[in-house]
Amino acid sequence: MRYTVLIVALFYVFFADAQITNTGEPRSWQLVSKKSIAPAVMQTFDLNKIKAEDVINDADRTKPWRFGYEFKVNLGLNNSGVWDDLPDGSRIWRLNVVSTGAKTLNFIFDTYKIPRGANIYLYNNDRSDLLGAYTNIFNRPDEMLGTWLVEGENVWIEYHEPSSVKGQGELNIAKVIHGYRSLTSVEIQEKALGSSGNCNQDVECSLGRDFDVLKDRLKHSVAFVIMQGFVCTGTLINNTNNDKTPYFLTANHCDAGDESTWAFRFNWISPNPSCATTDSSADATINQTTSGATRRASNSKSDMKLLNLDGGLDESWDLEWAGWDRSGQAPDFAVGIHHPAGDIMKVCRDNSPLSKITTPFENPETDMWEITEAGNGWELGVTEGGSSGSALFDQSGRIIGQLAGGFAACAGTNDNNREDQYGRFAVSWDFGNSDATRLSNWLDPRNTGKVTLDMLSQELTNGGGVPPIDEEEIIVYYSPEEAIINLSNGANKILEYVIFDLAGTEITSGRLTRDDEVIDMGDRSSGMYLIYITNTTDGTSFTKKVIVNKGF
């Protein structure tokens, strides 16, 4: 068995070729001639029945907001599409999917396993919307993948396989999602971007001089989430290591499909905002998307779910990791940033005191913050279906909860003065008796005991981050033939190391009191591991990523 071990500084783990760039183009676009193909045509369905169900479900904020109808299919490399051989010895597989009347199409792979050098693009028939490239970076142990949305009813999936890895790819599409409610720019002129109510405020609208500076950073932490045929909102959240671990907070009731098939879009922000008017928001040209997540913790007591985003985040996206407050103290005022009804990013503000309530939202009863009806609800904006899972921020810009449900809505360009409920962060922090039900072990991995943490940019600016060891002094290298990691202690300091897998399970640990240490990874399965190295003298630390890859 051949092993390959790759060492990369953790700072770059989530930024190196690990996200969808939406650049380049499919190889077939360069071909003068290629094989003809019969499209895979989806059956018709009763859209009126679906819309009637949505009237009921949209009023139930305990359910995610639905935008798409799900077709179960079985479309793979061996039973559908066509192959074309290219002059350089590589080949492409193309599949054409048509679902009449769809505003968007997206796809769920139940087998996604492609070798290094291969890639997948998705595009519509007139080539006006291109998504990709998806690469081997998105390979997961469960072999699942969910794509982002492609506009239109006629979409192509194209897989390119270099000659050096011919026959090594495995692909199968299990679900096609027919988007019958538009979440993109297809119908801007028909106010598709205005799918939320007219009282909503785009995130670029002012919330007041006491919060606008914070908001202008926090908006970069928020993502619009598609869960097969449903949508929610969530937020990148900081941890006490201040190390850009891609933790993502949303609601437990955002539960449509396995998290491994979810896709995320950041910075969907209108450049020409609508501030509680009937005017449409202008669409954003930015399309920063990634796919795939692993659940770290969840519970119904505070309707909390914490994910690790697995597909990569690009440093050029200028993202923010929001801070938090686990004290349970009521804030002076509260702010929400979210994507209501699958719309472009919005913001809301409540200046009234929050109430602590316990309600049978989920089983067991859920502990909430309530934007109170007695306080006349939100002063600016509201939330709607699709806002579920979005963070509630206090006056310092720290997360104190995530949206569970409520009755807030628009009445024209005004709100209806109704209440909303958010699961309380203080309850999420230490609920239950395991890492799988609470936030504390993930967001405070070194057990610092911090009660509050600022957003990452503030932590780094104010010196709140842990200063790194000079990584040039600590050399990590490997022997691919033996799958052995060698640690060289050039710092002449007493160092401790711990190796974790991506589930957070400790694999091994030790202390570097001599010049070199050898760690045998030969008995470990393929996957990613993290080596956390600490200077025992001053507490400084850094982390490196290890990828053990058997086969490809």
Image (cartoon, rainbow, N blue to C red):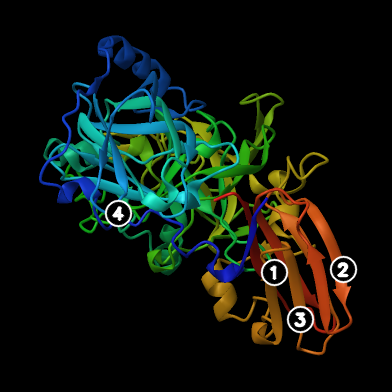
State the separation of the CA atoms marked 2 and 4: 42 Å
Identify the residue at horizontal 69%, vertical 23% (top origin).
Answer: 363
State the separation of the CA atoms marked 3 and 4: 39 Å
Identify the residue at horizontal 39%, vertical 16% (top origin).
Answer: 56
Q: Amino acid at mark 2?
A: Gly
Q: Amino acid at mark 4?
A: Asn
- CA neighbours of label 4 inside 10 A, class few (<14), some (14 to 19), many (20+): some
Tell whether label 2 touches label 1 (CB within 8 Å). Answer: no
Where residue 212 appears, as percent x and y from the top left, is 39, 65
Tell whether label 4 touches label 3 (CB within 8 Å). Answer: no
Mark nearer the viewer, 3 or 4: 3
Where residue 481 appears, as percent x and y from the top left, is 69, 63
- In the picture of the structure, the residue carrying the numbered disc 3 is 488
Please say if 194 is above or below 41.
below
Mark nearer the viewer, 3 or 1: 1
State the separation of the CA atoms marked 1 and 2: 20 Å
- In the picture of the structure, the residue carrying the numbered disc 1 is 479
- Label 3 vs 4, first from the N-terminus: 4
Mark nearer the viewer, 1 or 4: 1
- In the picture of the structure, the residue carrying the numbered disc 4 is 22
State the separation of the CA atoms marked 1 and 4: 35 Å
- From the viewer's perspective, tell me whether residue 365 is left or right of residue 333: right
